Amino acid sequence: MSQAAPGAARADEPAALITQAWQQSYFDAARALALGRRIVELTRDEPSGVHAAFGWLHVALAQARGGDAVAARDAAAKAREGFRLADHRRGLALVDEVLAIERRRAGDVHASAALQADIDARGDVGYDDHDRFVAHNSRAITAKRLGRADEALRHFYAAHAAARRTGWPGPIVLSLSNLSGHHLDLHNLDDARRLGEEALQVARESGARHSVATIAANLIVTHHALGRVGEARAMGEFLRTHLQEAAAAVPQRLAAPLALAHLAVGEIDAAERQLAAVPPASAADADSRAVRAWIAARCLLARGQAAQSLAVTREALADVEQGRAIAQPYDLLQLHRAAADAAEQGGDLAAALASTKRSQAQYEELVGRSARARYIALEVAHQMDATRHERDQAVESRRTAENDREHLAALNEQLRARMAETQRLQRQLEEQALRDPLTGLNNRRYLFEMAPRLIDLAARAKNTLCVVLVDLDRFKQLNDTYGHQAGDEVLKAFAVLLRQSLRRSDILCRHGGEEFVIVMPEISGDGAEAMLTRLLAIYGELRLNSGLRQLPSGSFSAGVAVYPTHGSTLDQLLSRADRALYAAKDAGRARVEQAQITQFSSLD
């Protein structure tokens, strides 16, 4: 029988088992728990030693992450006693990291944050890379629960960097999955998709079966949000056929994303069957209620059951408002959109308008979050802190050799270039936040920033200015008949037509849905009406295709309000233009109406 080399730990000795337990702790929690108990058993003759303390620590960590909270606290107390007797600062800090996880999972997020702050105040306690992964990952989740999105994102990136340094698949998969999920919450969809696809690949290659279902479910939502309906359906099929690989994940966690994969491509029966496969009592957890609600509402709308759909959305929104359900920003956006469509289909235009405004406000908030998340991601990717650190090292060694000075100059130039690139990207992101991603026109935020300035200029120059509301006729009927992709093609084509047909000085904005706002400086109401009438004729002759099908010719209705005749503020002019638009609709559509002249005091 061969003998181990002097000083080497055998695979069944406590020291080797502790290393194995760390490798398994975020890869296979059941295996890590078994290893922790095995360490405790092997060290029963020295229950107060450091090895025994680490055994209890692994039992506590496994239980805290998904087991018995009482068992987690009991094991943590035994680990703390062993580390205290050995004056083991790292071990004591790790015990508190585990307790912070347990407190957060028990619902006391503020107590978790306070304990983590206490650990951070102790200074260097000798953490290795896996310890840093555990700490940053836990702090990221705590910050996310407290609504500190930027702080959470930075901790998730720090956790991922530490995970990469360990080389262990468990931390790498989890950090990629968490980053992808958080970018999805922040509506930074491109990064969410890229990180999610990498996480799924690593999870499958390494055999991290417990992570496959969560990653695949997030990718379904990401593809749906990106408008990649085919990819969403394909990912749903992957998840359905790999449930065994996904280690029989909790059914209610999979029901909503699987239903969404079917809904994305119009498979309403399959979507409803998937939702119905999990009993309502099983699906009552706060995290899944909102997403299930808007998917169910969309299914009802597809069947023409507008009243039932509206009731589902209103109940879900009430649950979110009263804290009975948790809605991520994207889910809240979809609930408001479903409510708007249900109200419109049911003929309640006032409710439809109110829900549309809420969905637009939610969308603008998501755009801002997305830009901020992308900026942080770019900042991390550029590793500005690492570049500054390298530059400082070059300064310290400057006196040793001439080539150090050249190296320092190169580093400074690199830093300036990266800072300039980051500033350029930030400006680009700010510009994107003011544009509608589908049509490329300006959005409501831009409208409400620029229009008041143009009105002020018109007032000082004693010029007229027109505010026009344009609504594409029978657009909902087009969507219902030919699908949302056809509707998107029409919106993009109309946006191109606006740019080609109107003046460069006119401000073109997508107001929401199929509604557009045009601000036309230095033009009379008759002049604006003439331009829009010509545009209406051109649009009526436009022929578009969606796939192999030719779409019917379109028309629009428009309402024109004139400054200062119909109002002196943007809100007043929009209100009068809206009334004129409704007059055009009532008169049979496909026409342009100017606002009626009334007393200024009667304006909204």
Image: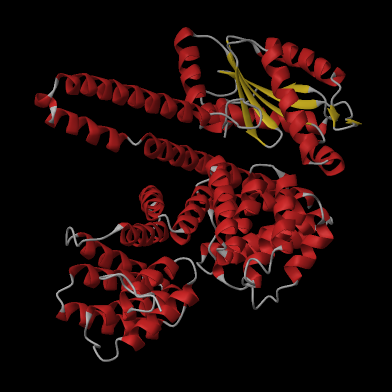
Q: Is residue 64 above or below residue 502?
A: below
Could you say which is closer to the camera, residue 277 or residue 49?
49
Q: Is residue 601 visible?
A: no
Task: Please tell me whether residue 275 is drawn above or below residue 499 in the rendered image.
Answer: below
User: Which residue ends up furthest to the front in the rendered image?
Assistant: 1
> How many numbered marks, from 0 up?
0
| Residue 252 falls left or right of residue 38 | right
Colouring scheme applied when the structure was drawn? secondary structure
**Residue drawn at (65%, 32%) of the image:** 438
Quadrant where the C terminus is found in the figure: top right
Residue 94 screen position, x and y as percent: 28, 69
What residue sits 69% from the left and 52% below the top? 338
- Left or right, 292 with reference to 23: right
Name the outermost residue toward the bottom. Answer: 45
Question: Is residue 387 something that shows in the picture?
Answer: yes
Q: Which residue is rendered at x = 88% and y = 26% of the image? A: 553
Residue 311, quarter of picture: bottom right
Q: Position of residue 71 (x, y in %)?
A: 38, 85
Nearer to the camera, 432 or 258 = 258
Residue 599 position in % (x across, y down): 59, 26
Farthest residue, direction left: 399
Q: Residue at x 68, y 42 (%)?
A: 227
Where's the N terminus, which quadrant? Answer: bottom left
When asked about the image quadrant of residue 246, the answer is: bottom right
Q: Is residue 254 above or below residue 84?
A: above
Question: 243 and 439: which one is in front?
Answer: 243
Closer-to-camera residue (521/135): 135
Task: State whether residue 284 is above or below residue 385.
Answer: below
| Residue 174, horizontal then vertical, whole percent | 48, 59
